[in-house]
Amino acid sequence: MKALIITAAIVGAETMKSDNPNLPYSPEEIAIEATKCREAGASMVHVHGRLANGQPTQDRETFAKILTEVRNRSDILVQFSTGGAVGMSVQERIEAIDLKPDMATLTTGSVNFGDECFLNTFPMIVQIAEGLKKHAIRPEIEVFDSAMIGTALKLQKMGLLEGPLHFDFVMGMPGGIAGSEAALTFLVSQIPEDATWSVAGLGRFEFPLAKLAIERGGHVRVGLEDNIYISKGVLAAGSWELVEKISEFSRSLKREISTPEQTRNLLKIQ
Ligand code: KMH
Ligand code: ZN
């Protein structure tokens, strides 16, 4: 089995410090957390921007500071969110991609997001994919439900995505695909043979799905964006603690943890 890529989703757009005070907001806090996650075994961080009051932002200047602060401290790979927060325009969501992060996300469909809708019409998806292609940024395809795989394959046929594709299955969100083993098995069965995949289980689904991914040759995303608890009712000391738990489990199964350099090669990041 290939070494395990652990991605730390350390910020998000929905979790607030009032949910878990260890959530970072400022670029400096984000960079410090990213460094701790790297020490705990993560080779990539998935980041969103936040204003000082915690409000989500995709502002280019904020992302520039995040990139600089992280790169000054660590060799961890940096993946920008192009999902941002519900209700943002595509223009807003991709404002920072010319900064050339190592990767950026691409959600290939719309999904109910709690009481709201995370809107990604086909023209919106094409616009984001074109932006990523223009700046030669490797996309991580975010799949909240199975139909999003078909749309990614269509984009590949159109020449907007280059194989081998890399998918991240975001599972267990109210409105999205269930966080069950059967659902994971189905998603994996739908992607091309040469594709790579990771799983981001939300809330209580984070650890059970991560374990399945480690055992099945997939990769794992954990972090306060997805889950704020280290165990039932106990807040995580930071995303790094969630990463540490995954690293320990992987080592116990004798699966090596990927370094940023190995991840770069595995995911064909330029
Ligand atoms: N915050 C969600 C609406 C991504 O980062 O690409 C979208 C999201 C996906 O988190
Ligand atoms: Zn995100």
Image (tube, rainbow, N blue to C red):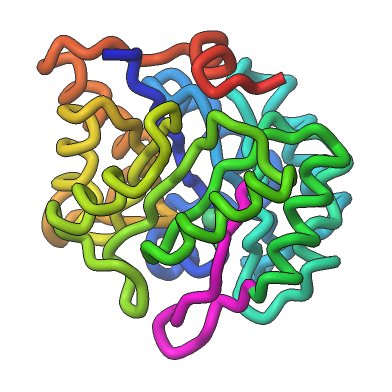
Q: Residue furthest front?
A: 157
Q: Is residue 7 above or below residue 155?
A: above
Task: Give coordinates of residue 72: x percent, y percent.
Answer: 74, 20
Image check: 103 left or right of 190?
right
State whether residue 230 appears in this view. no
Residue 264 is situated, as x and y percent measured from the top left of the image, at 58, 17
- Is 90 covered by the magenta stretch? no
- Which residue is nearer to you in this view: 233 or 217? 217
Q: Residue at x 50, y 17 (%)?
A: 266
Residue 69 position by quadrant = top right
Screen quadrant of the C terminus: top right
What residue span does the magenta drawing correspond to? 105-120
Assign ligand 1 to one image quadrant. bottom right
Magenta span includes 107: yes
Q: Residue at x 21, y 58 (%)?
A: 183
Q: Can you see residue 254?
A: yes
The image position of residue 179, as x and y in percent, is 21, 61
> Which residue is found at the position 50% from the left and 36% from the top?
166
Look at the picture and state if 5 lies above or below 84: above
Q: Quadrant of the N terminus?
A: top left
Q: Quadrant of residue 143?
A: bottom left
Q: Is residue 122 above or below residue 203?
A: below
Q: Quadrant of residue 133?
A: top right
Q: How many marks?
A: 0
Residue 182 percent across, percent down from the top left: 13, 56
Q: Nearer the viewer, residue 108 or 194?
A: 194
